[in-house]
């Protein structure tokens, strides 16, 4: 709870900013620039891996640095893990925050995950200080893993 509160504040701020931006100029939310060659990827698990829950996911980032949410240093961002997300969220809005869109706003580069048995997809998206994907977006490939009991 203690860790979530500042993040909720940021998210609230983000949504307020979105609201203002939409009122004045629809779709004109400013995007944070990313280097063309920046990329994010899974250090583990590997695409096609079979794992048992709980398992650790390690995030890789090349060409940029990790910074907590709210930090606006150039060429930085924080990781978001999309779990079983079929369609990518819009690039010009804050990434949703729910069970399928996990934020790592403290600057974490790994997490432990428990998923029900079966096939699951995982994808990483970097977000800026306000959880909005960069321009151009910094995304990993979407990997598929199988969870066994
Ligand atoms: Cu975020």
Image (tube, grey):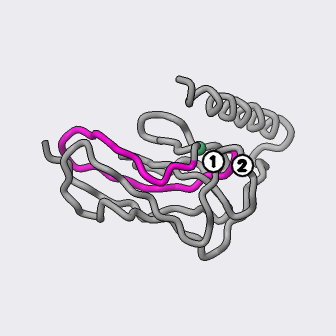
Q: Is residue 109 left or right of residue 67?
A: left
Q: Position of residue 98 (x, y in %)?
A: 48, 34
**Is 3 part of what is drawn in magenta?**
no
Specify whether residue 112 is painted magenta: yes
Pointer 2: what residue?
71
Quarter that holds the C terminus: top left
Residue 141 image position (x, y, % from top left): 42, 65
Label 1, ligand 1: CB separation under 8 Å: no
- Mark 1, residue position: 68
Residue drawn at (18%, 47%), measured in percent from left and top?
52
In this rendering, the answer to whether 88 lies above or below 46 is above
Q: Which residues are magenta?
A: 107-132
In the figure, residue 17 lies in which quadrant?
A: top right
Furthest toward the top, the residue is 1
Tell me the element at label 1.
loop
The residue shown at (42%, 40%) is 100
In terms of secondary structure, where does tag 2 sit? loop
Farthest-out residue, front? 2
Q: Is residue 47 left or right of residue 29?
A: left
x, y percent for residue 26: 78, 43
Q: Residue at x 86, y 39 (%)?
A: 24
How far is disc 1 from disc 2 in space, using C-alphas?
A: 6 Å
10 Å crowding of disc 1: few (<14), some (14-19), many (20+): some
Q: Looking at the image, do the residues carrying marks 1 and 2 touch, with CB atoms under 8 Å apart?
A: yes
Counting from the top left corner in percent of width and height, residue 120 is at 28, 49
Number of other residues with Cα within 10 Å of mark 2, as a class: few under 14, some 14 to 19, many 20 or more = some
> Left or right: 118 with respect to 106?
left
Q: Ligand 1: which quarter?
A: top right
| Residue 139 sits above or below residue 84 on the image | below
Residue found farthest to the bottom? 37
Q: Is mark 2 within 8 Å of ligand 1?
A: no
């Amino acid at each position: 709870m203690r860790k979530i509160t500042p993040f909720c504040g940021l998210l609230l701020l983000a949504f307020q900013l979105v609201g203002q931006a939409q009122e004045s100029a629809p779709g004109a939310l400013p995007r944070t620039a990313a280097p063309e060659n920046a990329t994010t990827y899974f250090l583990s698990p590997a695409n096609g891996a079979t794992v048992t829950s709980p398992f650790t996911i390690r995030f890789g980032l090349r060409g940029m640095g990790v910074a907590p949410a709210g930090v606006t240093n150039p060429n930085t961002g924080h990781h978001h893990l999309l779990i079983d997300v079929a369609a990518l969220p819009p690039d010009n809005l804050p990434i949703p925050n729910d069970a399928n869109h996990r934020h790592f706003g403290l600057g974490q580069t790994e997490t432990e995950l428990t998923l029900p048995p079966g096939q699951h997809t995982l994808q990483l998206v970097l977000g800026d200080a306000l959880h909005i994907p960069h321009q151009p977006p910094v995304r990993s490939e979407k990997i598929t893993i199988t969870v066994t009991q």
